[in-house]
Amino acid sequence: MYAVSKTHPIMFPGVKRHEINMRDVVHTQSSSEPGVPRVSMYTVSKTHPILFQLSTDAEHDDLLSNMMYVCCALYRIRSNPSNKSYWTTTRLGEVLTFDPLVAQGFQAQEKHQFCQMFNLNNCEIPVTRQLVNSFPPGTQLSVTGHIPKSCTRFSINLECGSSQLIALHVNPRFDQKEIVRNHFANGLWGIEDTYGPIGMDVGTDFIIMIQCDQHGFRIERNGYLLGHFECRLDPATITQITIRGDVSPLTIKYLSDKPIFEESGIYWRQIGGHLRQVETCDIGVTWGIGFDHTPWVYTGGWGSSSQVGSKQDMGTITDTQIFEVYENQRWNPISGYSARGLPTDRPTWSDTTGTEKRTKDSCVLMNIHWHWDTEWYIDYNIEGGTDKDGWQFALDFPCVFHATNNFTDTVRRRRWLRVARYVGQGPWSELGNTKLTDLSLHTDIGGNIRVWGLVAKGDALYRRDVSLEIPCGVSWEHVSHDETLVNISGYNNQVWAVGENGCAYWRYGITGSNPMGESWKCIDPPRRASLVQIAVGDLLVWARDSENCLYTRLGLSTVCGEGTLWQSIPEQKMKHLCINKREVWVITLEGNLTKRLGVTKDNPGGYCWVFTLPGSWTHLSVKQ
């Protein structure tokens, strides 16, 4: 039994002893390279991970297991994830979850609401703080501070993305002895509301409370009601609070009905397994896909070969990886084809692009959980065909290769393959022999679980009779389509897909009694864009193109399920999209998780990104 401590000492060669508060740990991941075991620890206080370089794979597994044991003990995590959990995978196939129900127990609460405190002491003005749950009805803010004797006016603004859109402007003006309430949109201020005495004096402390209800904002100063300001902009689009002017703010208290997803108090634990993608639904059924496209169903346990977990619901999980190298040769009139090429030629042994040298000996297994399943063999099933010895020929290396050695051909290549197999333990059960390239789980309004999948040749499949009692379902039903599909997503009987041609496809006619729908309707992509991924929420559809640019679909309604047009999201590029009802999450090109604020029915594009969680994340599924 390990002794659990909130601090953990770490010794680095040549430096002093360091101690880490384990409550600051957000998650630990393997960051190993083949033959180089390494663990990355991500904490609240650092933007970059703490790296642990280990000597052996056994040391790597032991350290990772110990770190997870301590963190799970501190957060009192002793059971499988709830159906509200976030599921994610990493570059190396690790499966992690974050359970908001666990975080709730460690988050400050006041008046049956979740509380976040911002300490603004010594902060420079203007000061801005993001409101990660926006400002829907029931939300409350309290701002405390000191008013200098020299103060003439200051302002508290509830902004939608930036200072160019202000839902509420509270502006005490001591030179005019009034408090102005207003909003700002389209470059213009609205009609000022100046009702009520100022109720504050220079040289004193103050507290201003703002509470949102169904009709607007209730505003108090120093415990007395100032008045009520009717909503002119949707408060659900509010993303931040900004304080400006001649004032010394001390604190901001943010109260929300929902748990406040902030950096502290969050721990992502490893569940076990080796998967490329995990998809879940809000009832608790979770599926995954391995790197070899094998589908797996979550059994309800937790743990792996290297970490202590549940004794039940564990099984053997396998995966495969195919290593490939290309053998390249050039023809010369003396010896014919040989490994001797021109100085500008690609290496004799290379990757598929020819830009990277790669030999058979350089292909090393990741760790002790992998073993070779085959010896090296020549691949005869390659695009363009091969001759009897596996060679392909071309005029030159950048040209198209073919199976016949023509008179004008001067180079040839052949591909060698070797299969590696992963064997470990995890809470997953293999599902049949059908290989899947993509997967989508969601529930409809009646609580029925809908599972859609895609196979390698691009056909769509629907899984019959998936339930909590039978999470693997009964059988697949083929859903015909003329185009090859590469991505699929659904929410409450709204199913969208992306074709290999870059177009989106909306499934028409899906109902509770006809969950497979009737036909696919082609939705043209944004101009000059080729879509590769789509994500669906509650009357909300986002898409990503081949350049990793993002778009949202406008005009969606219960009557017009396909929408009317695409709107570009102009900020930075992203490599993965995930939608939870009306929450939009993405994974950045660097592998970090981030959330979109200000997303509503009338503003599906939102206003800004918030909450960056570093890591080597590759896939996320959230279905609260």
Image (tube, rainbow, N blue to C red):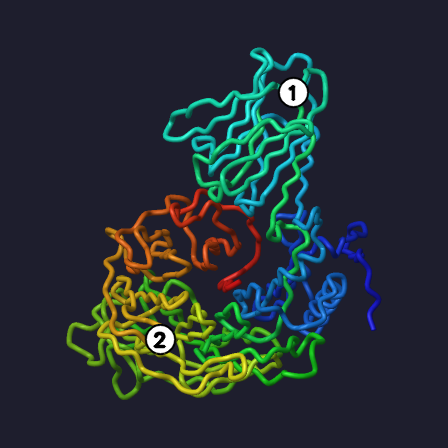
Instruction: Say what amino acid the circle numbered 1 marks.
Output: Gly
Between 436 and 346, which is closer to the camera in this rendering? 436
The residue that appears at 52% across and 68% down in the rendered structure is 282
Between 362 and 205, which is closer to the camera in this rendering? 205
Q: In the image, is residue 24 above or below residue 181?
A: below
* Residue 168 numbered tag: none
The residue that appears at 40% across and 50% down in the rendered structure is 601
Between 19 and 438, which is closer to the camera in this rendering? 438
Q: Is residue 285 left or right of residue 205?
A: left
* Residue 515 numbered tag: 2
Report the mark closest to the observer, 1 or 2: 1
Q: SS at mark 2?
A: loop
Q: In the image, is residue 287 above or below residue 176?
A: below
Q: In the image, is residue 195 above or below residue 463?
A: above
The residue that appears at 60% across and 71% down in the rendered structure is 35
Instruction: Say what amino acid the circle numbered 2 marks.
Output: Pro
Residue 278 percent location from the top left of the image = 50, 70
Q: Earlier in the sequence, mark 1 or mark 2?
A: 1
Residue 82 percent location from the top left of the image = 61, 68
Badge 2 local density, few (<14 within 10 Å), some, or many (20+)?
A: some
Look at the numbered discs 1 and 2 and tell me whether their residues touch, using CB distance below 8 Å.
no
Residue 489 percent location from the top left of the image = 39, 66
Quick one: quadrant of the N terminus? bottom right
Does residue 29 appear in the picture of this structure?
A: yes
Residue 198 percent location from the top left of the image = 61, 19
Q: SS at mark 1?
A: loop
- Give me the C-alpha separation between circle 1 and circle 2: 60 Å
Looking at the image, how many numbered discs can be counted on the residues? 2
Badge 1 local density, few (<14 within 10 Å), some, or many (20+)?
A: some
Q: Quadrant of residue 388?
A: bottom left
Q: Please name the residue that numbered disc 1 is placed on.
A: 199
